[in-house]
Amino acid sequence: MKAAGLLLIFLACSGLGLAAGEAAEKRLTAMEQVEKLIQLLEGELRCSYIPFPQAFRQVASRMAPPWEAFLLKMARRLEEMSGERLRKVWEEEVDGLPAECGLREEERRELASLGKELGYLDLAMQLNTLEHFRERWGRQMEEIRRDLPARKRIFRYLGISAGLTLALILL
């Protein structure tokens, strides 16, 4: 019975290490989705010269959850035009993203800050803003992408080590 308990402790700690590695990978995937969203939005605005609500709807059709719902809510709220500015709607919808979306708090803040620069400038300035955001975001993603294999390995080893240590202590 004791051996089964020790084995369960070891497996649980190892599983936590693997889960932490998967969370790091999910973060990168979420950031890639945001980059795609910004790139598609930039393309819609550059080529179609359509207003934001229509651009959000066009881009939403090519995005996976939760980004599809995010863009559709943005479009719906802007079309209702209840006197809210794009900035406020954008920030509220970024805050409303589910915790499972994969972004950390600092990435959410950076994404929310993008809304401050959209909706009130001319098209060229908005496209410039989106391009600069995408470049900054891309640099962060490259750093995460570079560190990801080492992080996953460290999380896995820490989980296994913690499991072995606890099992040995409880022996």
Image: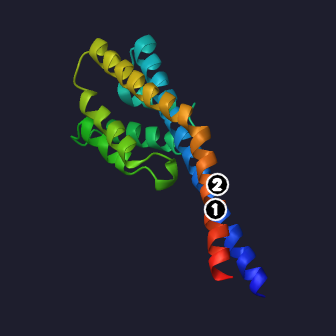
Direction from residue 65 to residue 114 in the image, left or right: left
Q: Quadrant of residue 88?
A: top left
Which residue is depicted at the point 64% across and 82% down?
170
Tell me: residue 148, above or below residue 46.
Answer: below
| Residue type of the residue flagged with mark 2 | Tyr
Secondary structure type for disc 1: helix
Residue under numbered circle 2? 157
Q: Quadrant of residue 51?
A: top left
What crowding class fits label 2: few (fewer than 14 Cα within 10 Å), some (14-19), or many (20 or more)?
some
Which residue is depicted at the point 40% across and 36% down?
75
Secondary structure type for disc 2: helix
| Residue type of the residue flagged with mark 1 | Ser
What crowding class fits label 1: few (fewer than 14 Cα within 10 Å), some (14-19), or many (20 or more)?
some
Tell me: residue 135, above or below residue 163.
Answer: above
Residue 8, position as x, y percentages in the image: 72, 75
Direction from residue 110 to residue 160 in the image, left or right: right
Which quadrant, please, contains the C terminus? bottom right
Which residue is depicted at the point 55% across and 33% down?
145
Residue under numbered circle 1? 161
Which quadrant, please, contains the N terminus? bottom right
